[in-house]
Structure formats: C-alpha cells, structure tokens
Image (cartoon, rainbow, N blue to C red):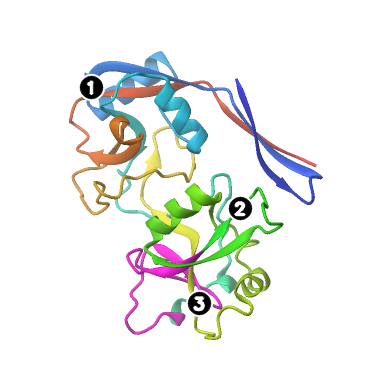
Amino acid sequence: MQWSLYLLILMGQCCFFTCRLYEYHFTAENKSWYEAQRYCREKYTDLAKVFDMTDMSRLRNSTQNQGEAWIGLNNNTDGNRTWHWSLPGVEYIQNDSSWNQSGRTDKEKPGNCVRKRDKLADVSCNHTLWFICYDEMKKDNKTLYLIEYKMKWTQAQSYCRYNYTDLASGLDQVDEEKYEAVIKGLIPDKKFSAWVGLFRDSWRWSDGSDFSFRYWDMELFIDTQSNKTCAMTLLNRSGKWSSDECDKEKPFFCYDGEFYSEFIS
C-alpha cells in the first residue's frame, strides 16, 4: 500500500490524499490487447492504469523486461473526445464563461489543446507558444511561472513536468486574476496568449477510470493512426507510451487492487 500527499491548499489546512492500494503485475506471455484484458480481469482486476509519474515508476520497477507491453489505455471510442486537465487529479468542469471560441485568429482552426488569452480557446497542439507552468512546491513563493520559450503543447507539458509540476491546470489556476498577475509587467501586447494544461483526447482506460495522465512518446506516437487504437509502454524508452494494432501480441501489465482518494479539511 502506498500513500501519497498529492496536493496542499489553503496554507496547509486542507489536504488531498491518494492511496494506491493496487499493485502491478507483469505477464511475459504474448497476447493481443483484448486477450490480455480478459486475462487480467480473470486473474487480477484489469489491464494496468496509470495515475501519474509515481505510478509509472512503480510499473517500470515491477519488471526487468525492456521491451513493449500493453497497458489498459485504448482508443475504441468512435472518436469521441473528452476534455482533461494535464495535472493528475484535477477534474475538468465545463464553464462556458471561461471560453471564447470566436477568439481564434483567422489562421487558427479548432484543435485539441487550449491556449489562454483573455479567455480559453482550443487550437492545434502543433502551434508554438509560450506557456504557464504550475509548481506545487512554491520554491520561490510562487505557484505559476510564465515560460518565455515557444513550444508545442506536448513539449510544454514535458518541460513543466521536468522543471516544475505540470502545465497550469484547473480554472482556479488559469483564471483572469492569476493569469494577469503572471504576465503583469512582462507582456505589453494584450493579445499575448500561452498554453495551459487543458487538452482533449479519445483515449479511455479499460476499467473506466477517468485518469487524465498521458505519457506519450511524441517521436513515435501519432494520434491519427486509426488502426492503432491500443496503448503500450516502451520500457526501453523510459516507459513512454505509443500505440499499436490491438491484435498484435505482446507482454502486458495487469493491476490488482484499488485507487482511493480523500479530501481532508
């Protein structure tokens, strides 16, 4: 059993605890994704799900294998995309007043990643923009940092996760007042915009969990490959993920147990 202090808010008076009561089990026998799913459901709970980087470390450490292995993420949803915040544990709640879909420029088409100007707008993830990182450790007594390097959304996400905690996530982090405070005195152009941690995809976990964590290897993963709808972890590439045809046979990870979280005030 593993306890994690996930988020501290309100000056330490409230805590969000996560308790991982589940364990990962690696099976070296090659099976298709659906055969692996049936096996995991019979022997354990389901194909492996991953909540955050702590889980990824636990999953990788459960085997010495350095090849490919199925996990429980799949894209068999008929293209139905759902919005998620990048920071694990932050739930997306629709708030129409935070959006300005008509605020895109003539060159911008609707996309799957979100940038913040005065309001939120969905644009292509391949745009290169500055971005806002969130730091839960408050190293400089700050939680939000404007990064003045232009990157694609996934590159910005990786940068924030490596150097801070994640891209700014949750409407409380990207609201007008906090956003203005971050860029105050730095950006004279009121049309300035930056990436925040909101994205949408059509990938779902086998057990129905709504975990938003993604760990794609962007050198290999192409989301538009319609015939590759099952996810695998590439253990020889730091465990990053890609996708493959579901009938391919590979080793796989199951999990057994529960995920428990509680907000304590």
Helix, strand or loop for disc 1:
strand
Task: Give me the disc on residue 201.
Answer: none
Kindly report the distance in space between the C-alpha atoms of the residues bearing marks 3 and 2. 27 Å
Q: Earlier in the sequence, mark 2 or mark 1?
A: 1
The x and y percentages for residue 7 are 67, 44
Q: Give the answer, above or below, for where 24 lies relative to 225.
A: above
Q: Provide the secondary structure element on which disc 2 rests.
A: loop
Quadrant of residue 113 in the image? bottom left
Q: Amino acid at mark 1?
A: Lys
Sequence-first tag of 1 and 3: 1
Is 125 rendered above or below residue 209?
below
Give coordinates of residue 222: x percent, y percent: 24, 51
Range shown magenta: 103-131
Mark 2 highlights which residue? 135
Callout 3: helix, strand or loop? loop
Q: Residue furthest front?
A: 140
The quadrant in which residue 261 appears is top right
Image point 65% across, 61% down: which residue? 172
Residue at image location 48% in from the left, 59% down from the top:
198
Residue 122 colored in magenta in the image: yes
Closer to the N terminus: mark 3 or mark 2? 3
